[in-house]
Image (spheres, coloured by chain):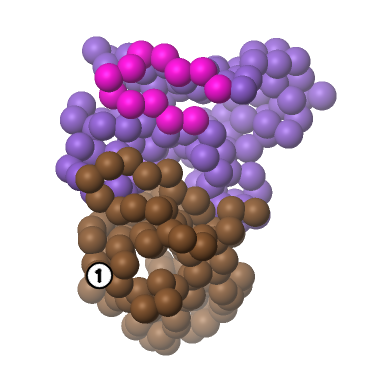
Chain colours: A purple, B brown
Amino acid sequence: GESVGLHLPTLSVQEGDNSIINCAYSNSASDYFIWYKQESGKGPQFIIDIRSNMDKRQGQRVTVLLNKTVKHLSLQIAATQPGDSAVYFCAEIPRTGANNLFFGTGTRLTVIP
Amino acid sequence: DSGVTQTPKHLITATGQRVTLRCSPRSGDLSVYWYQQSLDQGLQFLIQYYNGEERAKGNILERFSAQQFPDLHSELNLSSLELGDSALYFCASSVGGRGTYNEQFFGPGTRLTVL
């Protein structure tokens, strides 16, 4: 299913370039931060997570950076491919012991072949 | 495929009606979460169940209710439907539910249209 529509921030990149998607979070007491990818017609798909006591975490072609000073999270995608075109959401888990997610607005990434 | 199944895929109904959305979690997962995705509100957490018991509540309206059955599948009941309830409803599941972070796996969603 299509995700949040009319006022999504958008990012267009050329295939092969690196992408950087940014997110500002609200709760300084959040314990975990997660990036999800949502393709058209599908549910959110986990990409990578980072705990609040870390600054950086790397996965396969993806890196998440956490700046707690300014409450900013970023997702870097290396060598962006057409299959990376999707809406990307950051989500946070408050340090309450519960496991429910609070999602950001989302960014639509379009990869230009 | 996340292993989480949701039925139906699409649902069209009228205002004032009641519908039931169904979710089956991944094998072995004890927690089920319900989220609503609408154009103006984004993805919002509604409610979580863990092993049959309500564990956390988010922005869920009083017209909405949920339950988790002994076989761990869950149902989200939406009643007195309004036009603004039109949205995608996602179910997610995780192994645990509280005390430690557990990755959530999302189903494909149910698209509800209220006419």
Instruction: Locate residue A106, reporting x and y percent.
Output: 48, 36
Residue B46 placement: quadrant: bottom left
Residue A29 placement: quadrant: top left
Viewport quadrant of the N terminus of chain A: bottom right
Instruction: Locate residue B68, reporting x and y percent.
Output: 35, 74
Near mark 1 (Cα within 10 A), the count class, few <14, some 14-19 or many ≥20, is: few
Give the left or right position of residue B104, taking residue A78 as reference. Answer: left
Asked if residue A33 is positioned above or below residue B100 in the image, the reply reads: above
Residue B29 visible in the current orientation: yes
Residue B83 visible in the current orientation: no
What span is colored magenta in the figure?
Answer: A48-59
Q: Which residue is mark 1?
A: B53
- Furthest residue to the bottom? B17
Q: Which residue lies at the image location 30% right of the left edge and 53% below the top edge?
A: B97
Give the left or right position of residue A81, taking residue A33 as reference. Answer: right
Q: How many marks?
A: 1
Give the residue type at disc 1: Glu
Q: Which residue lies at the image location 48% right of the left edge and 75% below the top edge?
A: B22
Closest to the observer, A109 or A9 = A109
- Furthest residue to the right? A113
Q: Which residue lies at the image location 44% right of the left edge and 48% below the top edge?
A: B104
Asked if residue A2 is positioned above or below residue A96 in the image, the reply reads: below
Q: Chain of mark 1?
A: B
Instruction: Locate residue A51, reporting x and y percent.
Output: 33, 26
Instruction: Locate residue B109, reporting x and y percent.
Output: 54, 62
Viewport quadrant of the C terminus of chain A: top right
Closest to the observer, B4 or B29 = B29
Give the left or right position of residue B106, taking residue A83 as reference. Answer: left
Closest to the observer, B34 or A110 = B34
Residue A54 part of the magenta-drawn span = yes
- Furthest residue to the front? B28
Q: Which residue lies at the image location 51% right of the left edge and 18% below the top edge?
A: A58
